[in-house]
Image (cartoon, rainbow, N blue to C red):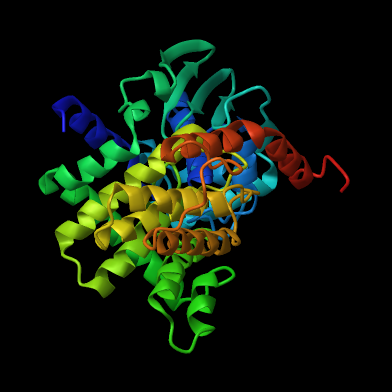
Amino acid sequence: MEKALYENYLKILHEELIPAMGCTEPIAVAFAAAKAREVLGRMPERMMVRSSGNIIKNVKGVVVPNSGGQKGIAAAAVLGVVGGRPELELQVISQTTPEQIEEAKRLVAAGICDCQLAEGVDNLYIRAEVYAGEESAVVEVRTKHNHISLIEKNGQVQFQQPDIETSKAGDKRLLNLKDILTFANEVEIGDVQELLQRQIDYNTAISEEGLKNPWGAQVGRTLLESIEHPTLRAQARAAAAAGSDARMNGCALPVVINSGSGNQGITCTMPVVTYAKALGSTQEQLYRALTLTNLIALHQKRYIGNLSAYCGAVSAGTAAACGIAYLEGADYEVIGRTIVNAIGNAGGIVCDGAKASCAAKIATAVEAGIMGYEMARRGRVFPFGEGLVETDYEQTIRNIGYMGRVGMQQTDVTILNLMLDKIDA
């Protein structure tokens, strides 16, 4: 593989596979608020958080970790202000104390934080404004959960940078299925070992926590309990779902994310890890399979965007099935057919916010992915030219992405309005 392309793919992995604690949307809110307080230099007397509809949607129903069971933007923002450490970025509230948690609860109840919908902005947009006396500070986060695009103090811009797509980040426009497969085959293991081992360790730990203890709706536990002798396929689905069970319901264990999402990071990881153990794969084979899985997930989400009405578990479950296929020696055609079969089936599952039911959607997406692979390995594929399956593998990925990004915009607005009680269904 050409060196420049190799380095680009490596950079993408290192930028994307980062640790986060809890659902990334409330954590991003806490991060912006914590940074705003740092800029202000003292505890604010009042604060305002303005955010996009997708942020509101994904914060409303999920428990903020280390918050004492609270939900919502105000809970995340106030906890960030009271106990957040912005230098930890997406683990910003990982070191809050019991005293800080109680103080944050008191301030939320006192109404220190006002929350508003920001219209006409990116799907991922947070603006944290903090005030004390005559002083103020503003921090904006855009396009990526830990990407600060603006800092102001007392109305004066102190820092400003472009959105992440136009910065010096790894160029995802260069992602394509053939080169991803080549990269997975040729990558020097030393270049990805530490990164992927952290992903395996963190995401396995929260999956095991979700299987051991009654988090949320207990989707992962239900999958195993409902089958007398769980198949490997059921185990893979349960392992992925259980991590989300714990994460969506306040578990403070960190995860390694994919496409800005912990749920998608878990979904990319656990089915591949489960199959690798059962197949007796070497650690190197697992690393290469996860390299492929992560990049295929990122490739799909490049067209959709990090936040939309399209459930990202579908992209991640599809990618995980490709990783399983890779472990079993699949070639480009089988992996391509797996993608077509999976997204041609489950593409379009709606995202109506982060919450307990995400675990069930993950289980569904992993099942669709594995079924797609089982079809593909037998030479069976949904024909090109039917529905959104068109021309070739890459065009099909683009079609699904366009449908998720553009076609489901009104779906996103409708979901948000229903959640905010703005329309009567």
The image shows residue 190, relative to residue 120, as above or below, that is below
Residue located farthest toward the right when viewing the structure as drawn: 424
Q: Name the residue: 46% across, 71% down.
A: 238
Q: Which image quadrant is residue 113 in? A: top right
Q: Residue at x 43, y 87 (%)?
A: 229
Left or right: 293 with respect to 126? left
Looking at the rendered image, the quarter that the N terminus falls into is top left
Identity of the residue drawn at 51% across and 58% down: 365
Q: Is residue 254 visible?
A: no
Q: Please tell me which residue is depicted at 51% across the width and 76% down the height of the picture.
A: 223
Q: Nearer the viewer, residue 334 or 383?
A: 383
Residue 111 image offset from top left, x and y in percent: 69, 41
Residue 325, image x, y percentages: 32, 59
Report if residue 275 is visible in the image.
yes
Viewed as shown, does residue 38 lie left or right of 107?
A: left
Q: Nearer the viewer, residue 389 or 57?
A: 389
Looking at this rendering, what residue extends furthest in the bottom direction? 228
In the rendered image, residue 163, in percent from the top left (x then y), is placed at 44, 21
Return the residue found at the far top: 156
Percent position of residue 173, x then y: 37, 26
Q: Give the total number of marks visible in the rendering.
A: 0
Relative to 326, say whether 187 is above or below. above
